[in-house]
Image (cartoon, rainbow, N blue to C red):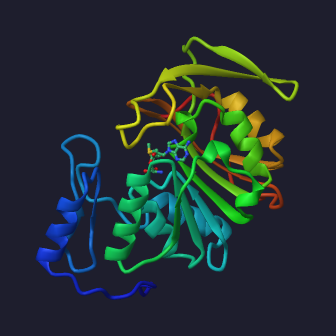
Amino acid sequence: MSSPFRTVSLSAELVDEANKAFDWRAATELPNGLMLGRMFEHKRAVPQTIPDKRIVQLNSIVGLQGKSVLEIGCFEGIHTIGLRTFTDNVTAIDVRPTNVFKALARLSFHGADAKVFVADCEKLDQSFGQFDVIFHFGVLYHLMQPVQHLKALGAMGDILFLDTHVAASEAELGSENVDGRDYQFALFNEGGWTDPFSGKDDSSKHLTLASLQDAIGNAGFSAQRLLNFRMERNGPRVLIIASRTLTLEGVASVSPDAPTS
Ligand SMILES: C[S@@+](CC[C@H](N)C(=O)[O-])C[C@H]1O[C@@H](n2cnc3c(N)ncnc32)[C@H](O)[C@@H]1O
């Protein structure tokens, strides 16, 4: 695939200046081989692949070319660039201004562009726009109102591609009623505003897988598939594709009974 991005001429000095401008928490390799950002010993110890393999999977299922994509919680813009390799219509939001600045800087240094805004996804509704695809990675489990948020997304997009932690089977569960239906969740502490990966509140709710699937269905996404159910350091995590209009026939689900290691 030839690159859809502009060629930008960046000397080592300019990249060094960008690397000093922000407290980067991830790194990507620029087209000229220089590294933008910072690598860490444990998590994000290597430059992140662009596009991420799950974006390649999304493209193979729905064909992103020509589609409008809303990315929720864009962090430093790495998936934003990945999505831009397949479609020129990407809008991204993050609740932290610094993440938005970093995302815009990273896009620019990769010769790419997208519409990037500071916004709290828990306050979004259809007045923000209508999208073919909502790309939602690593954010739902940082929210206090995940069910209400999924409901709002149901009015904003056709396809939901969601990667999130769910509550572990042995977790102590709470329950809440939203629009007459019960949803179960485990409560977690968040890392605070200065942690660039965290939610905006002190705590967050991790829905059980069954409640998450119910919330997606009740939001109007009539077809859904569990693409992946895995165990990570911070607990079980799922990748789900759902759609209001596609039947997702031919897209297989994995077993919802237990995460694989
Ligand atoms: C764990 S990081 C995931 C980043 C990226 N999506 C990924 O998969 O690598 C969570 C991101 O969501 C953002 N975020 C947290 N709560 C948010 C909210 N209410 N609205 C918008 N963004 C939020 C954080 O600032 C952070 O950039």
> x, y percentage for residue 201?
51, 30
Count of all numbered marks drawn on residues in the image: 0
Q: Quadrant of residue 175?
A: top right
Residue furthest left as drawn? 13
Residue furthest right as drawn? 180
> x, y percentage for residue 10?
21, 82
Image: 184 above or below 90: above
Asked whether residue 250 appears in the rendered view, the answer is no
Give me the residue at 42% from left, 78% from top. 112
Asked whether residue 203 appears in the rendered view, the answer is yes
Q: Is residue 81 left or right of residue 218?
A: left
> x, y percentage for residue 244?
81, 55
Q: Quadrant of residue 167?
A: top right
Give me the residue at 58% from left, 28% from top. 206
Image: 47 above or below 237: below
Q: Is residue 224 left or right of residue 208?
A: right
Camera-side residue: 198 or 234? 198
> x, y percentage for residue 248?
76, 58
Camera-side residue: 20 or 39? 20
Image: 150 above or below 126: above
Quadrant containing the C terminus is top left
Q: Is residue 131 left or right of residue 254?
A: right
Camera-side residue: 60 or 13? 13
Quadrant containing the N terminus is bottom left
Give me the residue at 82% from left, 58% from top. 247
